[in-house]
Amino acid sequence: METISRHVSSVALLVGLLFSFFVMISYQVNRADTVTAVQGTIQTVVSPVHRLVSGLWIGISSGWSGYVGLIGRAFEADALRERVEYLERRIMTFEETSRENARLMQLLNLQSRIEISSIPAQTIGRDTAHGYETFTVNRGSLDDVAIDSAVLSSTGVVVGRIIHVTPWTSTVQLITNPQSAVGAKVVRTSAHGVVHGAGGATLELDYVTSLADVEVGDIVVTTGDDTIYPPGLEIGRVIRVLQGAPVPGLPRLPLARTETALFLDIDVNPLADVLRVDQVLLLAPPSDRE
């Protein structure tokens, strides 16, 4: 009887333990389902907010990175622009230095070709109101410059003559000045005349007989008849030829026959741009020439 009772107690204990085990398993399953459900609800609610915040952060980060990148590129562009401007200035300086050296070499070569003693000079002043009449150079009586010294460009073209001298500077009367006069001739036919300024950028070749052969494009040079300019120096190129007035110095008469004209009206374009001449060569005056 005691044995049966002990057996029943053991079975009861086993059943109790099994029941407790199943209860615990059920609780764990239900708890996991509950947690999963809560997590799913939280994720459903928070996910759009998280996505929005994440998108805003990515946008702000990208915008800031782009802004910083643009600022950096702007600084680089400014630096490159300054570098380009600096290099352009350097190139302009080198080009101007090269041109000046070329002009100085031309003056030296011209000095070696001309047998007359000469002095190189630099233009330092111009008459802005009458640019085709005079300019000033940086040589004077202390450099042995004298009145009536012929003035040539760096290429050997006639520019004018000295009309006023101070110890340190001299005034040049340009060939484009209406008061100037240069003995001249046409190279091709040796037709002689006198060149003087026409009141602007051009010259006039006067006192060439109407029977002379002169054409547009002919080169005009000095004859040396004026004793100021050595013979053979270039002056300009003929740009217009017309029959002159029957009487020199008077206007043409509409009814006058052209064959009664004594001289031609000849316009000449100077070969030296007197408004842009910087370096010149001053020849010794006629009294000092050998």
Image (cartoon, rainbow, N blue to C red):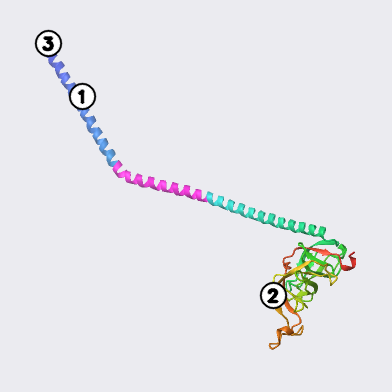
Label located before the other in sequence (2 or 3): 3
Res 193 label: none
In this view, the residue in front, 151 or 20, is: 151
Residue linked to disc 3: 3
Label located before the other in sequence (2 or 1): 1
Residue type (three-letter) at the residue carrying disc 1: Phe
In this view, the residue in front, 109 or 188, is: 188
Residue type (three-letter) at the residue carrying disc 2: Arg
Quadrant of the rendered image containing residue 9: top left
Q: Is residue 28 magenta?
A: no
| Rendering coords of residue 33 (x, y %) | 24, 34
C-alpha separation, residue under disc 2 versus residue under disc 1: 130 Å
User: Which stretch did the figure color magenta?
Assistant: 43-71
Q: Residue at x 41, y 46 (%)?
A: 58
In this view, the residue in front, 194 or 8, is: 194
Quadrant of the rendered image containing residue 147: bottom right
Res 240 label: 2
C-alpha separation, residue under disc 3 versus residue under disc 1: 27 Å
